[in-house]
Each structure stands twice: as C-alpha cells, then as structure tokens.
Amino acid sequence: MGEIISTLQYYFSYPFVRYALIVGLLVALCSSLLGVSLVLKRFSFIGDGLSHVAFGAMAVAAVTGITNRMIIILPLTVLSAVLILRTGRNTKLRGDASVAMISVGALAIGYMLMNIFPVSANISADVCGSLFGSTSILTLKEGDVWLCLAMSVIVLAVYALFYNKIFSVTFDESFSKATGINSDGYNLMIAVITAIIIVIAMNLVGSLLISALIIFPALSAMRVFKSFRSVTICSAIISVICAGTGIILSILCSTPVGATIVTADLGAFIIFSIVGTVMSRNKAK
C-alpha cells in the first residue's frame, strides 16, 4: 500500500496528471446528468452518434491544419445534434435511422480524410488515439482545463436552472406541451448540451467510448433507485467515482485511460444489477 501511495504521489506531482484527473471528474459529472434523461427518453444512441460526428470534425480540423480544433469540432457536433433531433421527427426517417445515417457517414468521412491527407506517418496510431483516447488525456494544458471547467459550469448551471422542465419533458412530452412547456426547445437544449459534453470528453475516453460514459452510470443507478432525483444523484456519484478510479488504475497499471474508465463503469453496473436483484427478491418475500 505504501508503494502504491508513493507511486501516485510521484505521478500527481506532474501538472498534466492533475489536469487529467480534474477534466475526467468534470466530464464524468456532466455526462451522468444528461445520461438519465437520454436513457429514459430512449434516445441513448444520440451520444454514440454525436461521438462519431466529433471524430469526423476532428479529422477535418487535423487535415486543414487548424491549431485550435475546438473551433470546428464544437459547432459541427452541435449542428449534428440539431439535425439528428429534427430528422428524427421525420415520419420517413425515424430517430434511430437518422442517428445511424449521420454518425456512420461522419465516421467514414473522417477516416477517409485522415487516409487521404495524413497528418503524420503513423495513421493507425492517430486513428486509435482519437477513437479510444489512448494518451490524449495526458497531453492536456492548463488552458484546456479552464475551458473544460467553464463548459462544465455552464452545463451544471443550465441543468440546475431547468431541472423541473427537463424532468417534465423526460417523462411526458404531451403533458408538458399541454401545460405550456416548450418541449421541442428543451429537447433541443438537451441535445446541444450532450454535444458539448461529448466534445469535452473526446480527450478523456475517445470518440467510440463516450456513449458508455453517458449511459452506464444512469443504467447502474436505475437498477437500485426509482425516483428521478435519486437516480440522477446516484448516477453522478457513480460516474465520478468510476472516472477517478479508472484514471488512478490506468496510472498504476499502465492501461488506456478511456478503456479503464469504461471498464470501471461496467463493473459498477454489474454490482448495482446484483444489488437491485437482491433487493427485488427481498421485497417479493
């Protein structure tokens, strides 16, 4: 135990490791909040779809040589969130089809651009790093941390301010519209915030694993708790703990950060599923 503590103290003496932990916890907190609404609205795949779009936008930024890639990635991902929401209401192109069309198309275009206009000699490493977030979290700078902190504060403030409206829209859109709530507007807000979280999370877990960061904590909390508030709080706690655990384990075991965090989330889901099953059987008795 003493050796583990000394190893962690050594690594956390470096600023980039501390930056990785701060960003990881912030991303985990924000993603868990929106995950509850997305799961309950059966729109979980929007996270997966937008993550593919973010990869395509990142490829465009890379081949054009833009230093600040956020200038391209964030607007394109937000625009795609709007398109997915709009086309998902089209009777000829339902939600799951629109997500598949936009996400797969963006992923294919991104990979094709990185092959036609390679930015380095090792294309496979670039693609793997972008998709799975291999080491990019350890290259964060202080400016990236402040940007993530600002976006996280905005996301948390919006969620807290419109909590009641989000709750209403999540469970019954028809009733919300009948009471005068702009359901379409709040659905759009949820989609845009999800897009922002995904852009922030790309450096943490990579574009292919982001949806797990959004969905797993919510699903885990739902195994045990039933009310919206308790599920949201529990989801946030699970997500933060798993993110911190994943980052620390990746440091100690030299494993990929993103994959380790998702594995921790999967472990939490299994534990909560077992606990939920035991509780249900005890109630039945």
Image (cartoon, rainbow, N blue to C red):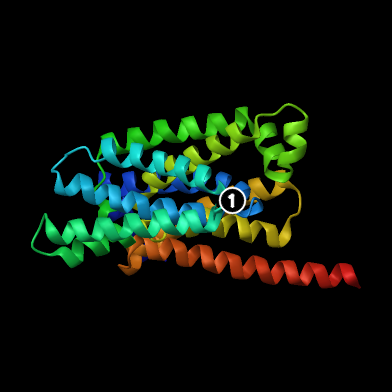
> Would residue 257 be visible to someone looking at this image?
yes
In the drawing, does residue 48 fall left or right of residue 39? left
**Among all residues in the image, which is located at the extreme right?**
285
**Among all residues in the image, which is located at the extreme front?**
92
Residue 248 image-quadrant placement:
bottom left
> Would residue 6 be visible to someone looking at this image?
no
- The three-letter amino acid code for the residue at tag 1 is Thr
Badge 1 is on which residue? 91
Where residue 209 appears, x then y in whole percent? 41, 60
Q: How many marks?
A: 1
Q: In this view, does 266 lie above or below 195?
A: below
Where residue 1 appears, x then y in whole percent? 42, 66
In the drawing, does residue 35 fall left or right of residue 19? right
Q: Alpha-carbon neighbours of circle 1 within 10 Å: few (<14), some, or many (≥20)?
A: few
In the drawing, does residue 171 fall left or right of residue 237? right
In the drawing, does residue 39 fall left or right of residue 118? right
Residue 135 image-quadrant placement:
bottom left
Q: Which residue is drawn at 61% across and 35% down?
A: 184
Where residue 137 appears, x then y in whole percent? 30, 52
In this view of the protein, which residue sits in the foreground, 160 or 234?
160
Q: Which residue is drawn at 57% across and 54% down?
A: 238
In this view of the protein, which residue sits in the foreground, 30 or 116?
116
State the SS at label 1.
Answer: loop
Q: Is residue 94 above or below residue 233?
A: below
Q: Residue at x 60, y 70 (%)?
A: 270
